[in-house]
Amino acid sequence: MKKFYASVLVALFLTSASFAADVTKKGEINSNETWSKDNTYFLDGYVIITDGATVTIEAGTVIKGLNEPSTGDLASALVVARGGKLIAEGTASSPIIFTSEFDDVKDKNDLDLTKEDECRGLWGGVILLGKAPLGDNNAEATIEGLPVQDNTKYGGTVENDNSGSLRYVSIRHGGSELAPDEEINGLTLGGVGNATTLEHIEVLYNSDDGIEFFGGSVNLKWAVVGFCGDDGFDWDKGWQGKGQFWFCYGGTDAGDHGGELDGASPDDNARYVNSTVYNFTFIGGWDGKKTDAKNEHAILMRDGTGGTLANGIVTGYNNYALQVEDRGESFDSYSKMKDGKLNLLNNIWFEFGAGSSWNDVLLATPEKCTDCSLVELKKELTDNNNELTNPGIDRKSWVPNRWSLAATKTGAAEPSGDNFFTNVDYIGAFEPESETSWLTGWTAFDQYVGPSVSVKKATIETGIYPNPASNVTTISFIMKEAGQMNISIVDLQGKVVATVASQDFAAGNNSVNFNTSGLEAGIYMINFINTSATSTAKLIIE
């Protein structure tokens, strides 16, 4: 009896072990399937989920794209055709990973990440195609580089079309070149409707853009894009969705805009981009030394894009902060801004290679833009509480310090009555000095770059005299080493009401005089921030 029982156990073990396998997928999927976390799936060429079919991927599943497909296709990619669905719902502890066949996801050192160009373009990417409307002369279009056929077309009339659900999905090392200057984005969204769910999405080391929207109305929350060869986020063809908690981190050898934001095709199409994005952090990767990345603009708003960008941090790009195209036409993005259809609200901009003033970092459109439009753009930014100053983050700690401007600045209120947006009281994509961030655990960014937790800073020794003050007070502080110190005055609502200093100081005792006569009587806080320490002190004005 014992021998029989033992034989049964061995048989059960072998049967269970046999379920784990390498499974190759190619061509069309025409019926419902479930992909098990016990298997590793290999995409051989274009794998297309066709109209009426649903593929469900279990949490923890790894899918790998072949670098050289046997099918004759130009790349390996997962394509969800119009009417098809992808249900890929990972968890914070068991994400779903799309990556290259060369990537051992259990070994973070198997690819040489110091050679960023060699970590990109190793397979294609993930492409969702839906039936939502486009800002285009045509009701439908084909994703660039893909063969023209019914399964590669997108667009239609169904605003609330549903292409499925992606949660805790990491897409790595993609962007195969299909033709000269035509690579696959990490996540391509063509005409995707707002009944589709996209939450906790990562794209790392992609040759082209990280995430690109072509029309549609899909929403995206908690998204990280890093080390891509072109733009972080890109939208075009009249995307009219919403976004919150977006993080973009630039590479050192390549990469262009944090956001390349187009309007429609053609430029004067009645449906143009009218999207709303709150709480974003775009870091160019520049830490005071120029990189080889192009980084022409942190954000380029072109071809008549509209919408709202609010409560964001943009910093560390090699060249310019912002260009809002003025081509002397009624539908360009500058005209949209003047008409109140393009809004940049309560954002913090800091440290660009082009200079340190608004006049330096706002880029004109060379052939048409006038000095007047730059003056108006500067006024628009300052009137809407944009600030060109230190947000209180550095390149290695993207979570703000709790006394930083990002943590204390009063932000623009999220749209009322909209249950998509989470109400938060900070600027940027991350809660200041939280013990963990929404990147922790499930992302390759956390694994490769980490840690994603801001280290609490040492306290700066400070002094204020006289305090209370009625005219001029002297603010003193001790620098343990030479470097930049940022000193600002905030009211009790957290709004910055004055900048005292933002400059380099010598090591040792330092002081600055501050004229308080421009402020109303009351209680204020003085914030001291540099790269190694922070502090705060109370100031009373009589």
Image: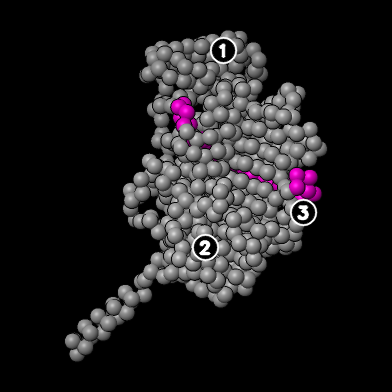
In the rendering, at what x and y percent does residue 446 appear? Answer: 42, 46
Residue in the picture at 57% in, 24% down: 354
Q: Is residue 456 visible?
A: yes
Range of residues picked out in magenta: 266-291
Which residue is identified by label 3? Answer: 137
Identify the amino acid type marked 2: Asp
In the rendering, at what x and y percent does residue 345 appear? Answer: 67, 35
Give the spatial CA distance, label 3 vs label 1: 58 Å
Give the spatial CA distance, label 2 vs label 1: 67 Å
Q: Determine crowd level at label 2: few under 14, some 14-19, many 20+ residues with C-alpha closer than 10 A.
A: some
Q: Earlier in the sequence, mark 2 or mark 3?
A: 2
Above or below 511: residue 378: below
Which residue is identified by label 1? Answer: 514
Above or below 270: residue 14: below
- Cβ atoms under marks 2 and 1 closer than 8 Å: no
Which residue is identified by label 2? Answer: 73
